[in-house]
Amino acid sequence: MQRTKKHSSIPREYPLPRLYTSVSTKEESLKVEADWHDYYELIYFQEGSFQLYLNLKEINIEEECLFLIPKGCVHRLYATSEKAVEHSLCFRLEDFCFFGGGYSGAGIFFRELRKEEHFFS
């Protein structure tokens, strides 16, 4: 599965949140070339090994974990093991609205994301 996600080409009116799932095998390897977009992407690395590049920094992923890709962050992703599974959730903050009897901690939950200050060590 040579997959190239083109999230940056998704128009503003395109419905989000949107979930993508990729299963990489020996025959069909996952390769997402350099990309950026105007919304957040939460990637759940479920199984396998990956190379993730965030703003020119290489991160080797060998175990299950989550990564938040901020909007505007240049990134690319390659599967490096024979079998690899990842799920990507693309969203905008306004996609999550909590009104009435909903979650009262929404302001606290999203406060850091709204600052749009993201750091990677």
Image (cartoon, rainbow, N blue to C red):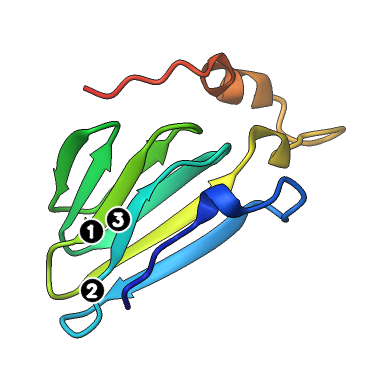
| Mark 1 Cα-neighbour bin, 10 Å: few <14, some 14–19, many ≥20 | many
Q: Is residue 100 left or right of residue 121?
A: right
Q: Which residue is mark 3?
A: 45
Q: Are marks 1 and 2 in contact (CB under 8 Å)?
A: yes
Badge 3 element: strand
In this rendering, the label closer to the viewer, 2 or 3: 2
- Regarding residue 66, the answer to whether it shows in the image is no
Numbered-mark total:
3
* Amino acid, disc 3: Phe
Numbered label attached to residue 29: 2
Dot 1 or dot 2, earlier in sequence: 2
Dot 1 or dot 3, earlier in sequence: 3
| Mark 3 Cα-neighbour bin, 10 Å: few <14, some 14–19, many ≥20 | many
How many angstroms separate mark 1 from mark 3 (CA)? 12 Å
Dot 2 or dot 3, earlier in sequence: 2
Q: Position of residue 67 (x, y in %)?
A: 34, 41
Q: Which residue is mark 1?
A: 78
- Regarding residue 57, the answer to whether it shows in the image is yes
Relative to 89, does residue 117 appear above or below in the rendering?
above
Q: Nearer the viewer, residue 32 or 87?
A: 32
In this rendering, the label closer to the viewer, 1 or 3: 1
Q: Is residue 70 left or right of residue 19?
A: left
Q: Position of residue 6 (x, y in %)?
A: 49, 57
Badge 1 element: strand
